[in-house]
Amino acid sequence: MLAFERLTVFQDAVAVARGLAGARWPRGHEALRDQAVRAAQSVVLNLAEGCGSQGGNRKRHFRLAQGSACEVIAALYLVDLPTAEAHQKTLRRVHQQLRSLR
């Protein structure tokens, strides 16, 4: 297991990405679903890549992950999902934890 896989922030980001991908989104929100799921996946992937990088690249990936977390939080305001508030809360925590990884 790689070091980033043990991080709570990584595990939280994965849980949100999987949760959004597996959620039943209301009809008519297909484009928003696709964008939110891609952004959630971007949080996970940039977090992992940042952990494997050094210097400026490391910071850049963590900033990208933070931006994607914000994008997902905003997208969840636009749809009625039962899990939206829980995912937003988790992503706010992920956003804060990413600051400490820089």
Image: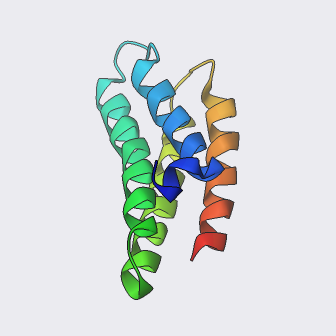
Which residue sits at x=50%, y=25%? 19
Tell me residue 26's x, y (percent). 43, 14
Q: Say if 59 sits above or below 89 in the image.
A: below
Tell me residue 22's x, y (percent). 43, 18
Tell me residue 17's x, y (percent). 46, 35
Residue 73 in sight here: no
Relative placement, left or right, of 21 versus 89 is left
Tell me residue 65's x, y (percent). 46, 60
Report the label total: 0
Relative placement, left or right, of 86 versus 68 is right
Which residue sits at x=60%, y=71%? 101
Image quadrant in which you'd find residue 77: top right
In this rendered view, identify the residue nearer to me: 9 or 75.
9
Q: Say if 51 sits above or below 85 in the image.
A: below
Relative placement, left or right, of 31 versus 48 is left
In this rendered view, identify the residue nearer to me: 51 or 43.
51
Image quadrant in which you'd find residue 48: bottom left
Q: Say if 56 sits above or below 91 in the image.
A: below
Image quadrant occupied by the C terminus? bottom right
Which residue sits at x=68%, y=62%? 96
In this rendered view, identify the residue nearer to me: 7 or 46.
7
Residue 93 in sight here: yes
Which residue sits at x=52%, y=62%? 66
